[in-house]
Image (spheres, rainbow, N blue to C red):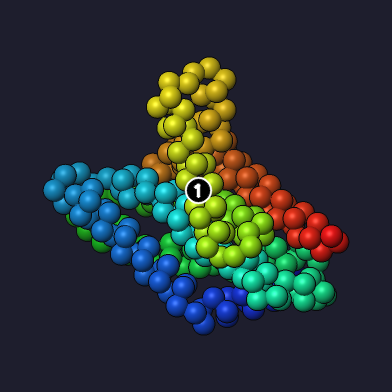
Amino acid sequence: MNRALSVARRELRSAWNSPVAYVLVVGFLLFAAGWLYFVRGFFAVGLADLRPYFGLMPVAFALLAPAATMRSWAEERRLGTYELLLTMPFTEAELVFGKFLSSYAVLGAALALSLPVPLTAALFGSFDPGALAGQYLGAFLAAATATAVGEWVSSLAKNQVSAFVAGASLLLALVLVDRIAAFLHLGGPAAEVSAWLSLGAHFEALSRGVLSGRDLAYYLATSAFFLYLTAWNVRRRKWS
């Protein structure tokens, strides 16, 4: 664990020494506030409801996570430091988990700094603190899954641009797969499978502050699965 944290600290220093992390955090804060107050018309509607704000999170993470993770492995490959990294005294799991923690910390910072947005809205309505805590817990879980997916895509990509495009495409597909199935009027097992796979469908209850063991298990299992795939891919490249 200590060695994974060492990797995370190295990656974090690199991330915050570039403007990318700052652009991601500030861009997310401005977009989230603009979405709630202007696009969704929080004041015009006259209803104290934060579901539109949190309902945006899966789509936002589908774009933010690939931007935060695109350099994790693809940039190492572009700079020619990928092979050097694999010769360091770290296991594949430690490297993968360290890079994951670094990217996740950027998204976590954006989420933590977004807290004043719903707190400001609370001045104009009454919100359940427990529901708000549940909504943020769901957002952090969704961010973790999106980050794990982004890490896996980055481990496959040859450059940052392809890592971002492929990661965003895959995550948007995971977010919207249940809606695509509904649009195509798919029913039966196809509809059930699409709903089970959908990152967005599992976030619906969490966006209302309702914690479900099924949804929590989905995010934890999916995050672990994609981190495993990333470690397997790194190991395969190490011995190829």
Q: Nearer the viewer, residue 213 or 43?
A: 43
Residue at far right of view: 239
Q: Residue at x 22, y 58 (%)?
A: 123
Q: Is 79 placed above or below 179 here?
A: below
Q: Nearer the viewer, residue 143 or 24?
A: 24
Q: Position of residue 152 (x, y in %)?
A: 64, 55
Q: Quadrant of the N terminus?
A: bottom right
Number of numbered discs overlaid on the protein picture: 1
Q: Position of residue 16 (x, y in %)?
A: 51, 78
Residue 235 appears in the figure: no
Mark 1 neighbour class, 10 Å CA radius: few under 14, some 14 to 19, many 20 or more: some
User: What is the three-letter code of the residue carrying label 1?
Assistant: Ser
Q: Position of residue 74 (x, y in %)?
A: 63, 66
Q: Residue at x 37, y 63 (%)?
A: 28
Residue 52 appears in the figure: yes
Q: Is 7 placed above or below 46 here?
A: below
Q: Is 173 placed above or below 163 here?
A: above
Q: Nearer the viewer, residue 178 or 122?
A: 178
Residue at far left of view: 44
Q: Nearer the viewer, residue 229 or 160?
A: 160
Q: Quadrant of residue 88?
A: bottom right
Q: Is residue 134 left or right of residue 219?
A: left
Q: Residue at x 59, y 52 (%)?
A: 149
Q: Which residue is mark 1?
A: 169
Q: Residue at x 33, y 44 (%)?
A: 51
Q: Position of residue 33 (x, y in %)?
A: 28, 60
Question: Of helix, strand and loop, which one carries label 1?
Answer: helix
Q: Is 180 placed above or below 6 here?
A: above
Q: Quadrant of the C terminus?
A: bottom right
